[in-house]
Image (cartoon, coloured by chain):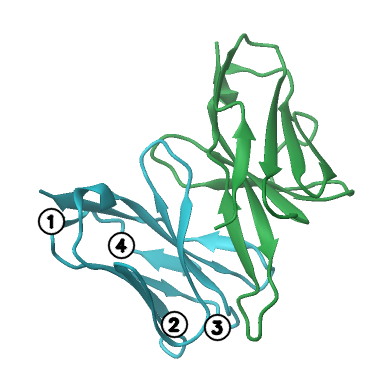
Chain colours: A cyan, B green
């Protein structure tokens, strides 16, 4: 089993809709979870960090963490074409190394 | 978030030459920096972890004599690709970890530089 699992997509949503991105992880010890956005040809950009169970909101983004079920999700409200990118879920493993999922490609259609 | 810069952003060189890439944390001190490589349509691949004042730790399969890493200060790490060959052409990205004080978990965030696109002819 991979340490971090993400659906590779592409996930296609119409402009203005809510995009829901999901991630499951195998390491129960991890306390820190992150969502990065990576545009094609660019480096990853940290958009959300979440450490506690529940929801964390930042603008149009909401991260949700459920440690018991070992999943973390990212909701993007009012999706815009500029949100089209690959979204990487990541966490620190037992060796304190940032471990990435394969990423979900999001396409927001005008 | 914290800012990490990288220079140069793009470099084209002839086979056999060496290329140095600089990575700086602009508004924080980074005790640990990381170097990644990414080929088109592929995932990030960690090459090495660099701690200030000590030797870098290389991932399996990464030649330490070919990819020289120096972490001279808390804000600067360099990667030198020695005797570059066309197969070394890739997108090289550095990353730095911020150490934050916190009350529960989640003490560190890791930020990425903009990357350096290396093309070896």
The residue that appears at 20% across and 49% down in the rendered structure is A81
Q: Does residue A93 appear left or right of residue A53 in this picture?
A: right
Task: Identify whether B39 is placed above or below A97.
Answer: above
Question: What is the number of callouts on the image?
Answer: 4
Task: Identify whether B44 is placed above or below B101.
Answer: above
First of labels 1, 4 by sequence position: 4
First of labels 3, 2 by sequence position: 3
First of labels 1, 2 by sequence position: 1
- Secondary element at image label 2: loop
Instruction: List the residue tagged with mark 2.
Output: A70
Q: Quadrant of residue B118?
A: top right
Marks 4 & 3 on one chain:
yes
Give the spatial CA distance, label 3 vs label 1.
Answer: 36 Å
Q: Quadrant of the C terminus of chain B?
A: top right
Is label 1 or label 4 in front?
A: 1
Instruction: List the residue tagged with mark 1.
Output: A15
Q: Are marks 3 and 2 in contact (CB under 8 Å)?
A: yes
Image location (x, y in percent) of residue A68: 45, 91
Residue A7's label in the rendered image is: 4
């Amino acid at each position: 089993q991979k340490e971090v699992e993400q659906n590779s997509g592409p996930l296609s949503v119409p402009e203005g809709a809510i995009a829901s991105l999901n991630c499951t992880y195998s390491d129960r010890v991890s306390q820190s979870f992150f969502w990065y956005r990576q545009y094609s040809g660019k480096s990853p950009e940290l958009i959300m960090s979440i450490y506690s169970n529940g929801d964390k909101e930042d603008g149009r983004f909401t991260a949700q963490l459920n440690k018991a079920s070992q999943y973390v999700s990212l909701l993007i409200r009012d999706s815009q074409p500029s949100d089209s990118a690959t979204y990487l879920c990541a966490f620190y493993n037992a060796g304190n190394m940032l471990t990435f999922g394969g990423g979900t490609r999001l396409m927001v259609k005008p | 978030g914290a800012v990490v810069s990288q220079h140069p952003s793009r470099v084209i060189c002839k086979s056999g030459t060496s290329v140095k890439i600089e990575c700086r944390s602009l508004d924080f001190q980074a005790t640990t920096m990381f170097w990644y490589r990414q080929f088109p349509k592929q995932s990030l691949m960690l090459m090495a972890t660099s701690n200030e004042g000590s030797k870098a730790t290389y991932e399996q399969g990464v030649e330490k004599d070919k990819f020289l890493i120096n972490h001279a200060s808390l804000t600067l790490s360099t990667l030198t690709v020695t005797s570059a060959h066309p197969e070394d052409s890739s997108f090289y990205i550095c990353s730095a970890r911020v150490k934050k004080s916190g009350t529960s978990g989640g003490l560190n965030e890791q930020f990425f530089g903009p990357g350096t696109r290396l093309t070896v002819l």
